[in-house]
Image: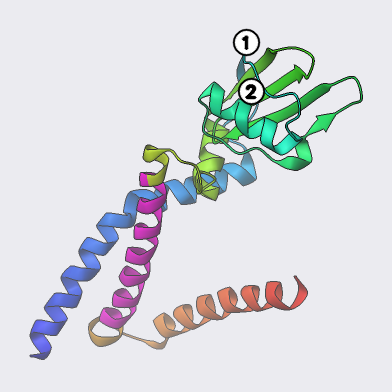
């Protein structure tokens, strides 16, 4: 019975590690890129165009932004702190996607909508994937990535736990290995406790 459990945990460890390996590589490399900027996060291209979109002049800023986004057919975030409007009817807001930004400007006295579509490079894409900024967007492919990320996190936890168990049962040789595990664990826990206490 013990042998069957050991074999099951061994293969669970192997396949869990294989499943999350690519995701962990991307997460690790993107974390390094955020710190060291191997790839630029600057805009790579900007496209400016206009569209005619009739709208209700009496709509409030948030409702108007949502309506324009819907008519543009863009799935992205609109942050209300980015809304800008003056007494003459000019209104500006931004739409954010993982690797694109849309600067939208209009006048409540006209149906003409001015759009500046800004494309970002691979550095911004890696940042978005690392931070999982696609959560909440109604985009099927981005939803799949988000689900894959969560699944990979669970499999990574399983791989680590089974790794510690298998190491403890079969591979432990001397106190040095125990010391390394304990030190790394204490370092991680102390960092989290520090953030929890200090903020």
Q: Which residues are magenta?
A: 144-167
Give how far across and how far down residue 145 sits, in percent. Answer: 39, 45
Colour scheme of the rendered structure: rainbow
Q: Is residue 97 above or below residue 195?
A: above
Label 1 neighbour load within 10 Å: few <14, some 14-19, many 20+: few
Give how far across and how far down residue 7 sits, in percent. Answer: 12, 77
Give how far across and how far down residue 179 sits, in percent. Answer: 47, 83
SS state under label 1: strand
Prevalent SS, magenta region: helix
Is 29 situated left or right of 143 in this image?
Answer: right
Is 156 situated left or right of 133 in this image?
Answer: left
Q: Residue at x 29, y 80 (%)?
A: 167
Instruction: Name the outermost residue toward the right.
Output: 87
Give how far across and how far down residue 140 sits, in percent. Answer: 37, 39
Q: Which label number is shown at residue 43? A: 2
- Distance between the alpha carbons at the discs numbered 1 and 2: 26 Å
Instruction: Name the outermost residue toward the bottom.
Output: 1
Q: Residue at x 34, y 76 (%)?
A: 161
Quarter occupied by the N terminus: bottom left
Please identify, in this view, whether the residue under mark 1 or under mark 2 is nearer the observer.
1
**Residue 102, quarter of the rendered image:** top right
Quarter occupied by the C terminus: bottom right
Q: Residue at x 43, y 46 (%)?
A: 26
Q: Residue at x 69, y 76 (%)?
A: 196
Query: Which badge, 1 or 2, is on the more N-terminal residue?
Result: 2
Marks 1 and 2 close (CB-CB < 8 Å):
no
Label 2 neighbour load within 10 Å: few <14, some 14-19, many 20+: some
Which residue position holds label 1? Answer: 52
Q: Is residue 40 above or below residue 18?
A: above
């Amino acid at each position: 019975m013990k042998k069957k459990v050991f074999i099951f945990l061994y293969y669970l460890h192997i396949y869990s590690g294989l499943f999350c390996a690519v995701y962990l590589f991307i997460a690790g490399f993107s974390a390094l890129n955020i710190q060291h900027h191997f790839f630029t996060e600057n805009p790579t291209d900007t496209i400016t165009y206009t569209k005619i979109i009739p709208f209700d002049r009496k709509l409030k800023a948030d409702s108007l932004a949502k309506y324009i986004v819907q008519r543009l057919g863009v799935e992205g975030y609109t942050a209300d702190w980015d809304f800008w409007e003056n007494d003459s009817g000019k209104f500006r807001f931004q739409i954010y996607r993982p690797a694109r930004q849309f600067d939208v400007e209009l006048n409540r006295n006209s149906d003409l909508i001015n759009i500046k579509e800004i494309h970002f490079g691979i550095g911004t894409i890696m940042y978005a994937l690392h931070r999982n900024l696609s959560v909440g967007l109604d985009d099927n492919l981005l939803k799949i990535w988000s689900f894959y990320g969560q699944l990979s996190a669970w499999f990574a936890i399983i791989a680590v736990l089974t790794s510690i168990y298998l190491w403890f049962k079969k591979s432990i040789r001397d106190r040095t290995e125990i010391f390394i595990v304990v030190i790394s664990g204490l370092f991680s826990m102390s960092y989290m406790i520090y953030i929890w206490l200090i903020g």
